[in-house]
Image (tube, coloured by chain):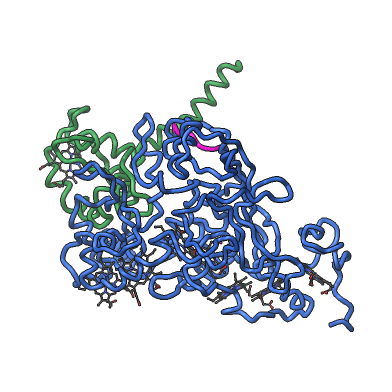
Amino acid sequence: MRRAILMLLFLASWVPWATAQKSSHADYFEHYEGTKTCLTCHQSEAESFFHSQHYQWLGTASHIVNAQGQALGKMNTINDFCTNPSSNWIGRVENKKGDVITRGCSACHAGLGLKPSPEMTQAQLENIDCLQCHASGYRRDVYQNGKGQWEWRPILWENQEGLDSVAKRIGMPTRVTCLRCHANSGGGANFKRGDLEYALSNTTRDYDVHMGKDGANFDCINCHKGSDHHVRGRGADLSANDMKETVRCSECHKTAPHKDADLNRHMSRIDCTVCHIPTFARTDATDMVRDWSKPAYNAEKEKYAATITLETNVKPVYAWYNGNTQEQLLRQPLNRLADGSVGMMIPQGSRNDPKAKIFAFKLHRAKLPYLKEQGWILPIQVEEFFQTGELDKSIREAAEHAYGVKNPVYGWADTTRYMGIYHGVRPHEQALHCKDCHGAGGRMDWKALGYPADPNPTGAPAPKEEQ
Amino acid sequence: MTFRLRFLTILLLLTLPAFLFAADGQTLFRENCKVCHGKGSKNGVYTPMSFTQDQWRRFFATKLVPSHKSAIHPVTHKNLLEGLTPAEMKALQNFAVDHAADSEQPATCG
């Protein structure tokens, strides 16, 4: 009997295609010929996707206090990671060995290479790359078409049988499909967010109670699903809000979920994430400081980059946040903070603000160029810089592209950005306890948070009569 | 033992495993497939990411032998298939499957 089972297992390992499940779209079309194949049945889903933040990279920015009614997004803002995509959209930059060192910012756009336009045309709808989110075996690369333009194509474009098989494996987005963009943003694995790393695609409850396979085994969309291709939850440092609705822990948990009243009394002033995510970047190191003024040559990859300081197992910083953010926008004067740095994304709120709570953040510092005369923050032509290392030229070109300024006189500014930490919630045994915050060596910077001193310097429970 | 000798022994011990594991799938692919299917080849350009995992499994199970039984390795001038042990064949297949177009890490053979 045992041998028979072993034999079966052995056979199964050799002929897996014989046992493969029939894919959901097996009979819906014969050959995949690009997005137009999907549009024959899903025109309305394509139209909804066209209007999403994921496609437009521009949208309502109700939570940016200085937005002045403008639509915002990656398209028209500058960040302190890869700066701005508009002059770095698509291409294939190779090093001397012939390895691709960058394919442009559109690598993280769910389109096939055209920039999103405000008007909805058929060409724009056919530019949507549905398979990136809906077919997990799908992978793509940049190629030059007959007219010399760059475009994204499935790597199987010359293998119709293989492409058809992948394009028919349709399903809802998995952790892997979302993480392919979200874990690799900022130019490397986990560089940007710190709490959105590849490890989440296949992990345990101990690492993340929600996404761990032996935990709730949630996909990203269990928390982020909205409707009509809009997702919920911009966090604290994205410009636009794709939907009005946020994602809150209290959708699934009680607002005061603890047996211990000493813990529950903190709920009105401290967000759940503060105690339940003690550290982030537990597998891949995250970018904590990016100094664009100091080009660094990576001999192994044969490319230039900014000087980046990476860290793992980082303790968050804690700050008040009421849901609104001040952003350093183009053509606005530099928002200098008390320490002299420029505030790229600064959460609003204070101890006196009843709508604010203390949240956990990754504090990202950087050095970016700015126009001295106008006092405007500058992007960098990063794709070109990666290859040549010619920083000055890459800044001049970007100044012209972004502001039409020729021969810019620029200086360097230190910048500060607060990025909310929401993922990597650990089992309750690993949550912060009284003495992690109260008493000597606690995590809270009480003065910075607006307290005269630690309200409970011994870390002891409150006297019973107060409870 | 002189320092020099000890150094050489250590070096030998350290490099030994590299010889033992020289039969890794990527090297095998480069030395036995890319030689005839590299960039610009008239025989067709094939790297692991030219096919899906299922296509590769099918290729190794049913197609490789009939289409390559008389292939002569351009460097060793020996029969290609006779020059590969069953273990090497398995390593080649695993490499192709693990880096197929629909795998988590599609790759060329470097």
In the rendering, at what x and y percent does residue A463 appear? 89, 78
In the rendering, at what x and y percent does residue B88 appear? 30, 42
Q: Is residue A355 left or right of residue A300?
A: right
A305 part of magenta stretch: yes
Which of the two residues, A30 or A357, is positioned nearer the viewer here? A357
Q: Residue at x 45, y 73 (%)?
A: A225
Magenta residues, start to end:
A302-306
Q: Overall secondary structure of the magenta stretch?
A: strand
- Chain letter for the green part: B
B105 part of magenta stretch: no
Q: Residue at x 81, y 60 (%)?
A: A446
Q: Is residue A352 above or below residue B47?
A: below
| Residue B63 seen from this side | yes
- Chain letter for the blue part: A
In the rendering, at what x and y percent does residue A43 appear? 26, 71
**Residue B1: quarter of image:** top right
